[in-house]
Image (cartoon, rainbow, N blue to C red):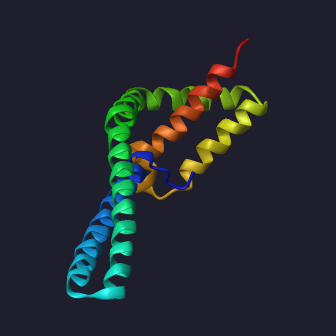
Amino acid sequence: MAGYKPKEDFEKAIGIQEQYILLLKSYHAELMMKTQKSKGFQQSKYRVDLHELSTKLDCQIKLYESKKFNYETYFLPDYDKQLKDCEENYDSVWLEACKYIKLNKDEISKKMKNGMDAIMELEEGDRKHIEVKNVVYKDLKTLLSLDIE
């Protein structure tokens, strides 16, 4: 688990994509100036490089727009609901899992204990982070639902 934060990771990936696009745009501008200043074979070579760079830049922009659209339209609304559910029910699910572990010594209780131990081994800041808590919350909730008597 080690501090898994999907929302934060997604935002970092989008930020990296933005930086990459800015670098490509800067390189494109510099290559354009070189192309205008050169002649003959070198100018032709720069034009080919410029065309390849333009194609790459267009693809990266489309990829970025798609990633941002998916993040804002699909991931974020659903994930915010999950985090809200976690905030409201984390403590009760944690206590229910503790009770289950005390009363049972089966495979489900071992998995619950492992998940709970894993979060307790984290630093306090990560342990209290809602995204990290959500990972354990979903695991415990799933494991508790498996106990059908």
Q: Nearer the viewer, residue 105 or 111?
A: 111
Tell me which corner region of the image, top left, top right, bottom left or bottom right, holds residue 55: bottom left
Residue 102, position in %: x, y?
A: 68, 30
5 to the left or right of 50: right
4 to the left or right of 19: right
Tell me which corner region of the image, top left, top right, bottom left or bottom right, holds residue 34: bottom left
Residue 96, position in %: x, y?
A: 56, 25
Q: Nearer the viewer, residue 2 or 32?
A: 32
| 22 lies above or below 47 | above
130 to the left or right of 43: right
| 140 lies above or below 26 | above
Write the residue at 40% across / 48% down: 129
Write the residue at 30% across / 71% down: 23
Specify the farthest residue to the top.
Answer: 149
Residue 100, position in %: x, y?
A: 66, 26
Write the residue at 31% across / 38% down: 72
Write the residue at 50% across / 51% down: 4
